[in-house]
Image (cartoon, rainbow, N blue to C red):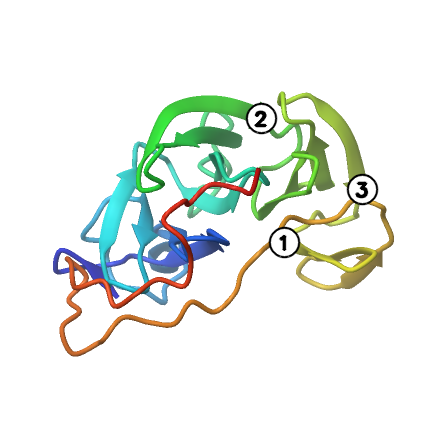
Amino acid sequence: NNFLGRNFSSLNDVTQHPVTGDLWFTDTEYGYWQYFRPEPTIRQQVYRFEPLTGVVQAVADYFYAPNGIELSPDWKHIYVTDTGVHTFPGKDNLTNPASIYRFDITPDGKRLENRQLFAYSDDGFPDGIHTDTRGNVYSACGDGVQVWNPSGVLIGKFVVNGGVNNFAFAPNGMYIFNADKLFKVTIKAQGRTVARDFGLADQSGGNGNGGEDHGRHHSGHWGPPS
């Protein structure tokens, strides 16, 4: 629940690397602005957590509000949504980000580099984010689920009145939800491999700053199968 002794502000979203088991997650200040978390004591950042060792690393910062996070299907990139346009309290600040950023994952699978602006939502802001097996990027926005190709070109929308908070791929379709309703959409696209159980570190020695490697459930090669 902390990084270097400072409590996380309001953990928001998480994605798991399907080979290493590492968890990549975002921490925002939304809990403070919605009155269920104390005043923040740390920057809004992206982190990587190794469940097998207990190691936590800050891997990206300089966000207004890092929110959704997702891997590309080839596991070479991380996408992060920034919902900074949505401010508390009061009116949205349209000069703040409503953006998706793409990072390259370093060859060792532990850090992020080469931050790029991937896409900008033309309605509301991008919240939850997922990718399909072809590398297309989907994000929950103010008018529904928007879809971009791997080059960041908007190629379609699933329009939903009231917008969308998040969604999930399922066999033969997608579940979409907002504040009031849950929808099932039948589509041919398939979501990428999501997650599996890799076990946990020996908690007797874990302090979030390191620990012994108690064995991994995979080979030393962290990349996608050739």
Say which label, 3 or 1, has the lower sequence index: 3
Residue named by callout 2: 120
Distance Cα–Cα, label 3 vs label 1: 13 Å
Left or right for 130, reference 209: right
Give the quarter of the figure containing the N terminus: bottom left
Give the quarter of the figure containing the C terminus: top right
Measured as percent of width and height from the top left, residue 187 is found at 85, 48
Residue named by callout 1: 166
Identify the element where label 1 is drawn. Answer: strand
Q: In this view, does 15 lie above or below 82?
A: below
Of the residues shown, which amino acid type is indicated by label 1?
Asn
Residue found 41% across the figure and 42% down from its top: 66
Foreground pick, 106 / 221: 221
Residue named by callout 3: 159
Residue found 32% across the figure and 50% down from its top: 48
Foreground pick, 89 / 78: 78
Do the residues under discs 3 and 2 have CB atoms within 8 angstroms? no
Identify the element where label 3 is drawn. Answer: strand
Q: In this view, does 86 lie above or below 206?
A: above
Distance Cα–Cα, label 3 vs label 2: 17 Å
Say which label, 1 or 2, has the lower sequence index: 2
Residue found 75% across the figure and 48% down from its top: 190
Q: In this view, does 43 lie above or below 208?
A: above
Q: How crowded is mark 2: few (under 14 residues within 10 Å), some or many (20 or more)?
A: some
Do the residues under discs 3 and 1 have CB atoms within 8 angstroms? no
